[in-house]
Amino acid sequence: MHIMVIGAAGMVGQKLLSRIVADGGLGGKAVEKLTLVDVFNPKAPAAFTGTVTALEADLSLPGTAETLIASRPDVIFHLAAIVSGEAELDFEKGYRINLDGTRYLFDAIRLANGEDGYKPRLVFTSSIAVFGAPLPFPIGDEYHTTPLTSYGTQKAICELLLSDYSRRGFFDGIGIRLPTVCIRPGKPNKAASGFFSNILREPLVGKEAVLPVSEDVRHWHTSPRSAVGFLLHGATIDLDRVGPRRNLSMPGLSATVGEQIEALRRIAGEKAVALIRRVPDENIMNMVAGWAPGFDATRATGLGFTAETSFDEIIRVHIEDELGGGR
Amino acid sequence: MHIMVIGAAGMVGQKLLSRIVADGGLGGKAVEKLTLVDVFNPKAPAAFTGTVTALEADLSLPGTAETLIASRPDVIFHLAAIVSGEAELDFEKGYRINLDGTRYLFDAIRLANGEDGYKPRLVFTSSIAVFGAPLPFPIGDEYHTTPLTSYGTQKAICELLLSDYSRRGFFDGIGIRLPTVCIRPGKPNKAASGFFSNILREPLVGKEAVLPVSEDVRHWHTSPRSAVGFLLHGATIDLDRVGPRRNLSMPGLSATVGEQIEALRRIAGEKAVALIRRVPDENIMNMVAGWAPGFDATRATGLGFTAETSFDEIIRVHIEDELGGGR
């Protein structure tokens, strides 16, 4: 089996690759070949014994997609995107990368399908940003997508294209609406959502973190491990069971910031909690007010997608996967 | 005021133009200039005393949109599209005209907005084809768009773009999800939905019509007069009242074919009903089974959009507008 990961250098892409190598295959089939694509430095996973091709390529340039598809990968994970903040700041860049790039990919596959019947599995990472306030809690599987960011708009459009191209038989697509990934490893970044991870990750290693919103803010989370699990399940699931509605809100954990902090207290004690500094930020509070509080992910759950059921579990996953099991 | 109608040669476009001329303006403002755009022969309305520019132009060709926008119309009605059947038969043409053409238009306005602050009202005709089976009855304002045709996909994508471009302040957009227009004037055509109109329009003038489905088929209708009313209301409504969710399912009439026939009986008698020939068509029955049975158009109704409340009324509108008030 030949797997291509577009957006391979990102956090989720890297964890996905490590997991495929650790599992020794995908859906019980051996993986002989990995093609890793990103605009910069798609690092090959250690310990993979098959063939690895790492390509620095920009999917938003016409022609790139055709070149990638020439190698006819069996499974394509399309994770590449510029993030919400950047897509909002640079309108044209957002549409070029998040919409046109994806459409180039879909069309290159469509043309290959016309040539020789090529029909890969395509797993696309969408986002809960396809939903925009005012939102109910929980958000059901049949709730409309009315994004309030250009990023969310671009993801919602790609979802529609994915369904139509799948319906026409050009590829076997599935769209995975990822919850906010928490605890995001690495350093604190400037993403408006960063604090959800920062207030847990930093205190766990004895560092201060800033909390810019009040404790009653409710949001929708999943661990990096579960996010990778969603993608792998999407790559192997029987799509006849999914039917024509190919974009699925994933299961996750709805929790308030206060509940996150309580879980931290249970696992790492009062000393860790004391490292959270409250610095209210009007801008971030306003943004977060429009974010999804949580989902009733009945369809995805029924289709076998699984996620954590407590924040204690999310913190333990972080300790196991990022801190070597200890603190 | 300068009004541009793109797709001016179509049935709705022509009726819209006649109505603007008959009303002597739009929203209480005089219309000095009309620009009519279509790929073929956009006919100028009779009795208009202002300036008319009629252009044969293809919006799906790069550069056309910039040329159109150079004249800075105050209000743009974008009605141009290839229909569902053609978009399904010719995948590339459908995306080129229904998606790329619309995006060229939106981007030309965006660039003009960047140059001199140009910000027109833009009224876009969407369709109930953005919804795909299985559908509830009635379909609520917050139901998700999961189209089962490429046409419906293209309309749903344009809706998302319209909302985002409006949110960013490039234009004041509103998307009008038209019900099936009934009674469609003119000759019977090959559209799968044609029979809804044929079984009324033809018997009203003593001609036979073919009914390919059973009488219990339920669908969502509005008269051509109401469709034009939706567009005019969309062109003048205070968009602050609409808010960021700019795409609205219009009010209409949910009726079974049997109820259509009963209305025909009441208005034109048994002799008219006897002209309906039942010729079941498996293909059409299968297509129609996935169509929208009706909507709970609470938002649009609350915003002042109005439609007929009985099929008798829809038939009378046809008699008034198409048959000179008599039969």
Image (cartoon, coloured by chain):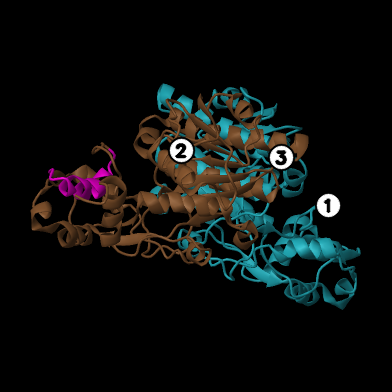
Chain colours: A cyan, B brown
**Three-letter residue code for mark 2:** Tyr
B195 part of magenta stretch: yes
Q: What distance separates the C-alpha of mark 1 from that of mark 2? A: 36 Å
User: Secondary structure of the magenta portion, mostly?
Assistant: helix
Front residue (pair B301, A96):
B301
Give the quarter of the image for residue B312.
bottom left
3 and 2 marks in contact (CB < 8 Å): no
The secondary structure type at the circle numbered 3 is: loop
Q: Quadrant of the N terminus of chain B?
A: top right
**Which numbered disc, 1 or 2, marks the residue that appears first in the sequence?**
2
- Marks 1, 2 in one chain: yes
The answer to whether one can see residue A322 in this image is: yes
Q: Chain of mark 2?
A: A
Within 10 Å of disc 3 (Cα), the crowding (few <14, some 14-19, many 20+) is some
Determine which residue is flagged by label 3: B118
Residue B166 pos. (x, y %) = 65, 48
Comparing B2 with B95, the one in front is B2
Q: Nearer the viewer, mark 1 or mark 2?
A: 2
Question: Are tags 3 and 2 found on a single chain?
Answer: no
* Residue at the spot 44% in from the left edge and 32% down from the top edge: B94
Residue shown at 22%/57% (left/top)?
A: B257
What residue sits 84% from the left and 76% below the top?
A: A269
Where does the image place residue A183, in percent across and percent down from the top left? 74, 60
Q: Which residue is mark 1?
A: A189
Specify start and end residues of the magenta stretch as a single range. Answer: B191-208
Q: Amino acid at mark 3?
A: Tyr
